[in-house]
Image: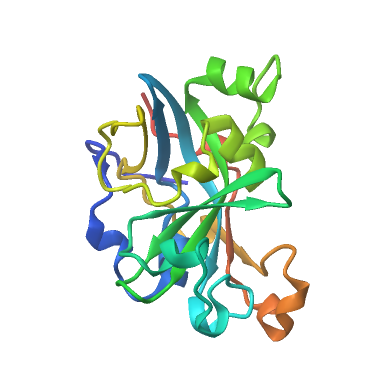
């Protein structure tokens, strides 16, 4: 596996506002997700995502144009955080994509941490790190300190806001080959009928080995 590396940069708004949410979900593995909680930064390389196509996708919270207090964030401009509470216990972090009033989103399901390992272990009550600790959207959000109250945050700026917390995604110019990304059906959406079989889940092959050279 070969990658090109240049200077890292914040993903621009234009990355998120493109119309093809499936393409965006495929391109996010290899990008780097970080949070800053009052000066404590944690995060790493995204390794797993799922695409949700909004109004036409039975698995989406916005299926058939559903708009509620919770899902209203999905109708904002691409590059907005959509964080919702699952089973009343777990905050799950999504990236809103496309234009205003088109509620596409990408669920971030896993990452390989490279920053803030100590705080990640503290948040998860673990002693040593391995990528499995930040695999699964509930564990990932907990590891990075992401809470459903952060829904609506702008991902296109890395400066902390008045809450003392920020979320952003960086492009460090790592370019996986197409064969490094595995596409499978999404998890836990059997209720979506035919939509449950769509290959909208994307995983990086051996993500712990894909970091750029120091």
Where, by quadrant of the figure, is residue 168 drawn?
Answer: top left
**Residue at the front extreme of this rendering:** 69
Question: How many numbered marks does the figure carry?
Answer: 0
193 or 199: nearer the viewer: 193
> Considering the image in quadrants, where does the C terminus appear?
top left
Q: Name the residue: 45% across, 43% down.
A: 150
Q: As drawn, is 173 to the left or to the right of 92?
A: left
Residue 56 location, x and y as percent?
Answer: 53, 85
Where, by quadrant of the figure, is residue 143 drawn?
Answer: top right
- Note whether 84 is above or below 21 in the view shown: above
- Note whether 171 is above or below 19 in the view shown: above
179 or 191: nearer the viewer: 191
165 or 139: nearer the viewer: 165
Residue 130 location, x and y as percent?
Answer: 66, 27
Q: Name the residue: 25% across, 42% down.
A: 157
Where, by quadrant of the figure, is residue 169 drawn?
Answer: top left
Q: Name the residue: 68% across, 17% down.
A: 128
- Note whether 181 is above or below 75 in the view shown: above
Residue 103 location, x and y as percent?
Answer: 43, 72
Image color mode: rainbow
Residue 182 location, x and y as percent?
Answer: 59, 61
């Amino acid at each position: 596996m070969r990658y090109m590396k240049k200077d890292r940069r914040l993903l621009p708004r234009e990355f998120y506002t493109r119309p093809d949410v499936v393409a965006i979900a495929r391109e996010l593995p290899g990008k780097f997700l970080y949070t800053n909680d009052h000066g404590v930064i944690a995060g790493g390389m995204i390794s797993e995502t799922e695409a949700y196509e909004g109004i036409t996708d039975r698995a989406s919270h916005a299926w058939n144009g559903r708009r509620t207090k919770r899902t209203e964030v999905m109708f904002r401009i691409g590059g907005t955080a959509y964080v919702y509470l699952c089973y009343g216990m777990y905050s799950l972090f999504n990236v809103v994509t496309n234009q205003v009033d088109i509620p596409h989103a990408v669920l971030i399901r896993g990452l390989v941490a490279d920053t803030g390992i100590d705080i990640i272990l503290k948040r998860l009550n673990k002693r040593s790190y391995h990528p499995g600790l930040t695999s699964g959207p509930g564990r990932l959000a907990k590891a990075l300190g992401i809470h459903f109250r952060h829904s609506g945050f702008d991902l296109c700026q890395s400066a902390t806001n008045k809450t003392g917390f920020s979320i952003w995604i960086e492009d460090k110019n790592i370019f996986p080959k197409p064969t490094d990304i595995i596409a499978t059906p999404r998890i836990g959406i059997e209720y979506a009928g035919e939509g449950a079989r769509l290959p909208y889940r994307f995983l990086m092959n051996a993500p712990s080995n894909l970091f750029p050279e120091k």
